Amino acid sequence: MISNARRLASTGLFYQRVGRNAGISVMLIAATLVVGTVGYVVFAHLGWVDAFHQASLLMSGMGPLEENGWSTVAKLFDSVYALFCGIVLLVSYGVLFAPILHRFMHRFHLEDAAHD
Protein backbone atom coordinates (compact mmCIF):
# COMPACT_ATOMS: atom_id res chain seq x y z
CA MET A 1 0.00 0.00 0.00
CA ILE A 2 1.25 3.48 -0.87
CA SER A 3 1.33 5.94 2.04
CA ASN A 4 -0.20 9.41 1.88
CA ALA A 5 3.29 10.93 1.46
CA ARG A 6 3.74 8.99 -1.77
CA ARG A 7 0.51 9.81 -3.58
CA LEU A 8 0.45 11.49 -6.95
CA ALA A 9 -0.78 15.09 -6.95
CA SER A 10 -4.42 15.55 -7.90
CA THR A 11 -5.35 16.22 -11.51
CA GLY A 12 -6.51 19.71 -10.58
CA LEU A 13 -3.19 20.55 -8.94
CA PHE A 14 -1.35 19.12 -11.93
CA TYR A 15 -3.33 21.30 -14.36
CA GLN A 16 -2.70 24.30 -12.10
CA ARG A 17 1.05 23.66 -12.30
CA VAL A 18 0.91 23.23 -16.08
CA GLY A 19 -1.05 26.48 -16.40
CA ARG A 20 1.38 28.38 -14.17
CA ASN A 21 4.39 27.11 -16.13
CA ALA A 22 2.67 27.86 -19.45
CA GLY A 23 2.11 31.43 -18.23
CA ILE A 24 5.78 31.77 -17.24
CA SER A 25 6.82 30.41 -20.62
CA VAL A 26 4.57 32.83 -22.51
CA MET A 27 5.82 35.78 -20.44
CA LEU A 28 9.44 34.79 -21.13
CA ILE A 29 8.79 34.63 -24.87
CA ALA A 30 6.84 37.92 -24.83
CA ALA A 31 9.63 39.69 -22.92
CA THR A 32 12.18 38.39 -25.42
CA LEU A 33 10.05 39.67 -28.31
CA VAL A 34 9.83 43.10 -26.65
CA VAL A 35 13.62 43.21 -26.23
CA GLY A 36 14.10 42.19 -29.87
CA THR A 37 11.55 44.65 -31.21
CA VAL A 38 13.03 47.57 -29.28
CA GLY A 39 16.54 46.49 -30.27
CA TYR A 40 15.68 46.46 -33.97
CA VAL A 41 14.00 49.86 -33.70
CA VAL A 42 17.03 51.36 -31.94
CA PHE A 43 19.93 49.62 -33.72
CA ALA A 44 18.58 48.76 -37.19
CA HIS A 45 16.22 51.76 -37.43
CA LEU A 46 13.28 49.58 -38.46
CA GLY A 47 9.67 50.59 -37.99
CA TRP A 48 7.79 48.99 -35.10
CA VAL A 49 5.94 46.45 -37.26
CA ASP A 50 9.05 45.51 -39.22
CA ALA A 51 11.05 45.24 -35.99
CA PHE A 52 8.43 42.97 -34.42
CA HIS A 53 8.36 40.90 -37.62
CA GLN A 54 12.13 40.52 -37.58
CA ALA A 55 12.18 39.61 -33.87
CA SER A 56 9.35 37.10 -34.34
CA LEU A 57 11.07 35.40 -37.26
CA LEU A 58 14.28 34.97 -35.28
CA MET A 59 12.38 33.80 -32.20
CA SER A 60 10.55 31.15 -34.23
CA GLY A 61 13.74 29.91 -35.88
CA MET A 62 12.76 31.08 -39.37
CA GLY A 63 15.79 33.32 -39.66
CA PRO A 64 16.24 37.00 -40.41
CA LEU A 65 14.83 38.99 -43.30
CA GLU A 66 17.09 40.74 -45.77
CA GLU A 67 19.51 42.95 -43.89
CA ASN A 68 21.25 44.91 -46.65
CA GLY A 69 22.41 48.32 -45.51
CA TRP A 70 22.44 47.56 -41.81
CA SER A 71 25.19 49.07 -39.70
CA THR A 72 27.77 46.95 -37.92
CA VAL A 73 26.02 47.59 -34.59
CA ALA A 74 22.70 46.40 -36.04
CA LYS A 75 24.31 43.23 -37.39
CA LEU A 76 25.97 42.55 -34.03
CA PHE A 77 22.66 43.03 -32.24
CA ASP A 78 20.99 40.72 -34.76
CA SER A 79 23.60 38.03 -34.15
CA VAL A 80 23.48 38.24 -30.36
CA TYR A 81 19.68 38.37 -30.37
CA ALA A 82 19.52 35.26 -32.59
CA LEU A 83 21.71 33.31 -30.14
CA PHE A 84 19.72 34.64 -27.19
CA CYS A 85 16.44 33.58 -28.86
CA GLY A 86 17.71 30.03 -29.23
CA ILE A 87 18.53 29.83 -25.55
CA VAL A 88 15.24 31.43 -24.47
CA LEU A 89 13.25 29.05 -26.66
CA LEU A 90 14.96 26.03 -25.11
CA VAL A 91 14.45 27.39 -21.60
CA SER A 92 10.77 28.14 -22.27
CA TYR A 93 10.26 24.56 -23.53
CA GLY A 94 11.89 23.28 -20.36
CA VAL A 95 9.68 25.44 -18.16
CA LEU A 96 6.58 24.42 -20.12
CA PHE A 97 7.21 20.67 -20.00
CA ALA A 98 8.73 20.46 -16.49
CA PRO A 99 5.48 19.61 -14.66
CA ILE A 100 4.57 16.99 -17.28
CA LEU A 101 7.96 15.32 -17.05
CA HIS A 102 7.87 15.58 -13.25
CA ARG A 103 4.49 13.84 -13.09
CA PHE A 104 5.64 11.17 -15.52
CA MET A 105 8.77 10.42 -13.50
CA HIS A 106 6.88 10.59 -10.19
CA ARG A 107 4.31 8.09 -11.45
CA PHE A 108 7.02 5.58 -12.36
CA HIS A 109 8.70 6.13 -9.00
CA LEU A 110 5.44 5.38 -7.23
CA GLU A 111 5.01 2.19 -9.23
CA ASP A 112 8.55 1.10 -8.27
CA ALA A 113 7.91 1.94 -4.61
CA ALA A 114 4.68 -0.10 -4.63
CA HIS A 115 6.67 -3.19 -5.65
CA ASP A 116 9.15 -2.83 -2.77
Image (cartoon, rainbow, N blue to C red):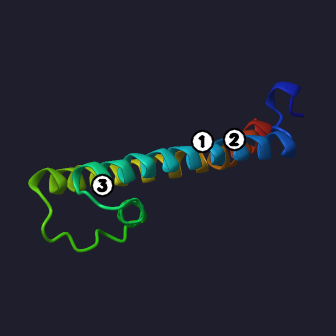
Mark 1 → mark 3, Cα distance in angstroms: 24 Å
* Location of residue 19 in the rendering, given as x and y in whole percent from the top left corner: 72, 46
Amino acid at dot 3: Tyr
Task: Determine crowd level at label 3: few under 14, some 14-19, many 20+ residues with C-alpha closer than 10 A.
Answer: many
Q: Nearer the viewer, mark 1 or mark 3?
A: 3
The number of callouts visible is 3
Please state if 64 lies on the left or on the right of 110 as rendered: left
Q: Residue at x 76, y 44 (%)?
A: 111
Seen in the picture, residue 9 relative to 87 is either above or below; the reply is above
Amino acid at dot 2: Arg
Marks 2 & 3, CB-CB < 8 Å contact: no
Mark 2 → mark 3, Cα distance in angstroms: 30 Å
Give the residue pinned by disc 2.
20
Give the residue pinned by disc 3.
40
* Location of residue 115 in the rendering, given as x and y in whole percent from the top left corner: 77, 41
Query: Residue 17 sits in which quadrant?
Result: top right
Query: Residue 63 sits in which quadrant?
Result: bottom left
Marks 1 & 2, CB-CB < 8 Å contact: yes
Seen in the picture, residue 3 relative to 108 is either above or below; the reply is above
Amino acid at dot 1: Ile
- The quadrant of the image that shows the N terminus is top right
Task: Determine crowd level at label 1: few under 14, some 14-19, many 20+ residues with C-alpha closer than 10 A.
Answer: some
Task: Determine crowd level at label 2: few under 14, some 14-19, many 20+ residues with C-alpha closer than 10 A.
Answer: some
Name of the residue lying farthest toward the left: 72
Give the residue pinned by disc 1.
24
Q: Residue at x 50, y 50 (%)?
A: 29
* Location of residue 102 in the rendering, given as x and y in whole percent from the top left corner: 65, 42
Mark with earlier residue (2, 3): 2
Foreground of the two, 68 or 15: 68
